[in-house]
Image: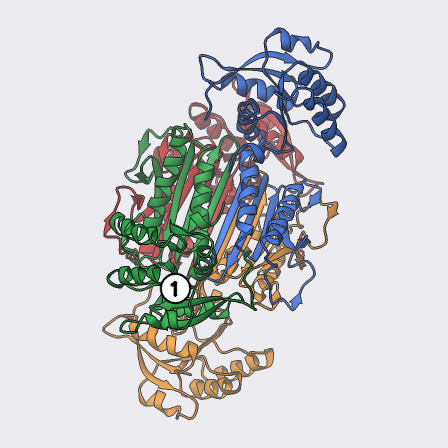
Chain colours: A blue, B orange, C red, D green
Amino acid sequence: MNARGEDNPIRVGVLGAQGLMGAQVVKAAGEAPDTTVVATVDAGDDLARLTGAGAEVVVDFTHPDAVMGNLEWAVANGLHAVVGTTGFTDERLAQVRSWLSAKPEVGVLIAPNFALGAVLAMRFAQQAARFYDSVEVIELHHNRKADAPSGTAAHTARLISQARREAGRKPGADATTSELDGARGARVDDVHVHSVRLPGLVAHEEILFGQEGETLTIRHDSMDRTSFMPGVLLGVREVLKRPGLTVGLENVLDL
Amino acid sequence: MNARGEDNPIRVGVLGAQGLMGAQVVKAAGEAPDTTVVATVDAGDDLARLTGAGAEVVVDFTHPDAVMGNLEWAVANGLHAVVGTTGFTDERLAQVRSWLSAKPEVGVLIAPNFALGAVLAMRFAQQAARFYDSVEVIELHHNRKADAPSGTAAHTARLISQARREAGRKPGADATTSELDGARGARVDDVHVHSVRLPGLVAHEEILFGQEGETLTIRHDSMDRTSFMPGVLLGVREVLKRPGLTVGLENVLDL
Amino acid sequence: MNARGEDNPIRVGVLGAQGLMGAQVVKAAGEAPDTTVVATVDAGDDLARLTGAGAEVVVDFTHPDAVMGNLEWAVANGLHAVVGTTGFTDERLAQVRSWLSAKPEVGVLIAPNFALGAVLAMRFAQQAARFYDSVEVIELHHNRKADAPSGTAAHTARLISQARREAGRKPGADATTSELDGARGARVDDVHVHSVRLPGLVAHEEILFGQEGETLTIRHDSMDRTSFMPGVLLGVREVLKRPGLTVGLENVLDL
Amino acid sequence: MNARGEDNPIRVGVLGAQGLMGAQVVKAAGEAPDTTVVATVDAGDDLARLTGAGAEVVVDFTHPDAVMGNLEWAVANGLHAVVGTTGFTDERLAQVRSWLSAKPEVGVLIAPNFALGAVLAMRFAQQAARFYDSVEVIELHHNRKADAPSGTAAHTARLISQARREAGRKPGADATTSELDGARGARVDDVHVHSVRLPGLVAHEEILFGQEGETLTIRHDSMDRTSFMPGVLLGVREVLKRPGLTVGLENVLDL
């Protein structure tokens, strides 16, 4: 998957290393054969530790208040960056692009979701949407979740709707004439989305496509945040080869 | 499962033998080792053919306009009956009970649903409902279905709600505070029911129970009406041992 | 579900209170409205603390070396017991029965599995097995599991096989004439069992029944040991009403 | 999805029009808004009816003995072809390519499987295989099937194994040290494949990927052969734009 190996591992610096996600990045990048952690930085620490230790890539799971300063410094110093911190508006992305225009060899990957399975499920759903008129989404979460549908399911539904429209397809008809209020779910764009809430569940999404005589189902089950690490490490490997700004893990998967 | 066998098969008469269901009953009862079809009757035929042929049990998949006449005759002549014809009101059931009071040795089984798996799924759902606060129902059907939720799913939800109440349980809380209209499904009694409609689906029901750390799922998938025959044959075997009126296949399953 | 409530909660003593399971029992019994923890005991502590605190029921998640002494003392002192400790042979069960014969008012419940969903799934599988010739079991676990199939799946298969046999049914035929070694799974008694191992899975069991035109599926998903607590609390409530020895949680469910 | 519409539908000729599949092609191509059936041909009919009627594309679901003659004639006469007939060896494919070299503007699509969902499921499995060490396949069919695993599942497993190898991944380890013979399924290349056989099932395939904390599942459920028609019609539309030989529906999906 990449040309770097145990003899010459990718030198990673972790920002927010004591945070929930940062600590997992330190562990995961320390254990993978082709990466090594050369520096960790938390609030109050001097960023120069990263260059001092010879870091090539920084991973940032910090805070919206801190991440822009970190990124400006990293790009200026020629370090690639993989960013999971939230809060990126169009203005912020434009700012990052402007910094990168002065350092065209540097790569930055900003992703709202590093769960590989979730990203693949969404991408497969987009691909399948070109071939099916009829699709529905069921998302299932623990009963402590406040919003329904989940942000991921709503995002998936919008991607499906857009892909279907771009393929010149119209939403498949259904014959429902008598509906108990809510039975057919919420409509996100023109996709029906159903939200199940039960203790014992964690975070699950199922996308069902159907046409005469067959159905195709894509399902993602997420148990905990350890599932983000393979996506973060993939980002670390790929950002080295991709100068400029990339938004979304799906764009480094080469699907 | 029963004392009758190839040497002494149960002698079955089929009413409505040329109908969709009746024809399948003729085929199924002809093939089973412990039943044999001795007479078939359709509109215009003389019911006396049944007694003439020595039928013990009649199976009636006819029409609401014909079934009461058939039943009155069968009970009066000492024949047991298994009935899948629809349209039984409380008044009609009372009438059948009155006929049976004069023939206490005769058994009549009237069932709205002979799909064994569907009946078992409902019964298991009722049993599980005593132990779980939290449960939701997902039913999935082809996109030509007019009503949502399906009658079976609504019936299942009401049975669950009743069983939960009788066990002294309250519906489990969920934390939903922000809901896109319909996302959390329809409420049947106090059970959330979600209806999916897609071409390629046939008729499917899933009942999900959850509590901290685990979920229990019961699912029934129905492909076509051949699935009713094992339930009909079971009814034929059981009605011989159960004098009086029995309503619902679940009441001969001894669960 | 029981006559005891907040005004008069069941007084529970926990043996092995600092163990993994014991600590959860302390927490769960402390939080439930109809139970209260009046004493905790660990290795080296005096059992008399239990009677001193007025315990009615003891819960024992200790060690095979300790449990028999605990039980002898509890029965002798008129305390009911719910036991999750392993290692009960027929000899040990006979010994417990002998102690109970001198104290006929005392109840003891010994159960190898307190996961309510798993116990219900097994019981439903037994019930359904009476009506289906054809059934297979799929169990799915994380890839750190050493044995295949899992003990639970093997136990389920044996229960199914026995229930099917008692109902006079033979295993359904299949037409497989060309099989790549292992494709059709392991045979436990006469039931096919398939074992899937993947990181990301926890502990899952699926029992599939099929006959012409329909399938019935029962699935249990277990995420972690918190799922045992509702079963333990149910045991505490039920043991009060059931003098003598009961083996297996399924026998207090009144299904 | 294509520039042709009701005003100018694609003119289709159907070979083997009275066969099981051919009859469905006639019906489906007659109903779609952008295709029209201009000629049907069966054994004994003159192929010149196709050119006489102005066919642009022929669809061939005939017989291995007939298909090569049909194709030679079609290519020579400048007609595109979509072929579902079986029996294409490397020699036959080379022969078709040689005919096409003399008519470079003609397109021929030969596909062993026109079930869109099955083709998509296989393609998604290949794509996901690049990101997961651990994957297993479960295929479920009716109990009249003679071979286990199914050809589709074995093919899927081989595609996964190849994609994983090409991505530099090794099969994920599992800890199984004690296995009841067959429990862990068949090994196809290095992928575990499990085959379930039950009456009531039709044809189903499930591909499960897992890594720490998450699983990704792709499932295809096939009910009957009507599900092939959208794939055939897609082939008809795409073959017009793709001169030369294309083997496999997946190669016209532009995934």
Q: Is residue B79 visible?
A: yes
The tally of labels here is: 1
Left or right of C165 in this view: C9: right
Q: Quadrant of the N terminus of chain D?
A: bottom right
Left or right of C30 in this view: C181: left
A25 vs C214: above or below: above
Q: Tell me residue C73's x, y (percent).
A: 49, 28
Q: Tell me residue B140's x, y (percent).
A: 55, 59
Left or right of A34 in this view: A46: right
Q: Which quadrant would residue D60 be assigned to in this image?
A: bottom left
User: A86 and D107: which one is in front?
Assistant: D107
Task: Please report the residue visible at 34 percent of the width from the left and 45 percent of the height from the top.
Answer: D155
Task: Please report the residue visible at 40 percent of the width from the left and 79 percent of the height from the top.
Answer: B22
C51 vs A218: above or below: above
Q: Chain of mark 1?
A: D
User: B171 and D19: which one is in front?
Assistant: D19
A156 vs D42: above or below: above
Q: Tell me residue C49's x, y (percent).
A: 59, 23
Outermost residue, top direction? A52
Residue topped by disc 1: D58
User: B227 and C132: which one is in front?
Assistant: B227
User: C244 and D153: which one is in front?
Assistant: D153
C49 vs C161: above or below: above
Left or right of B88 in this view: D241: left
Q: Which quadrant would residue B212 be assigned to in this image?
A: top right
Which three-letter amino acid code belongs to the residue tagged 1?
Val
Q: Is residue C255 visible?
A: no
Q: Residues within 10 Å of mark 1 (few under 14, many from 20)?
A: many
Task: Please report the residue visible at 49 percent of the width from the left and 84 percent of the height from the top.
Answer: B67
Dot 1 falls on a residue whose secondary structure is strand
Q: Tell me residue A62's x, y (percent).
A: 69, 22
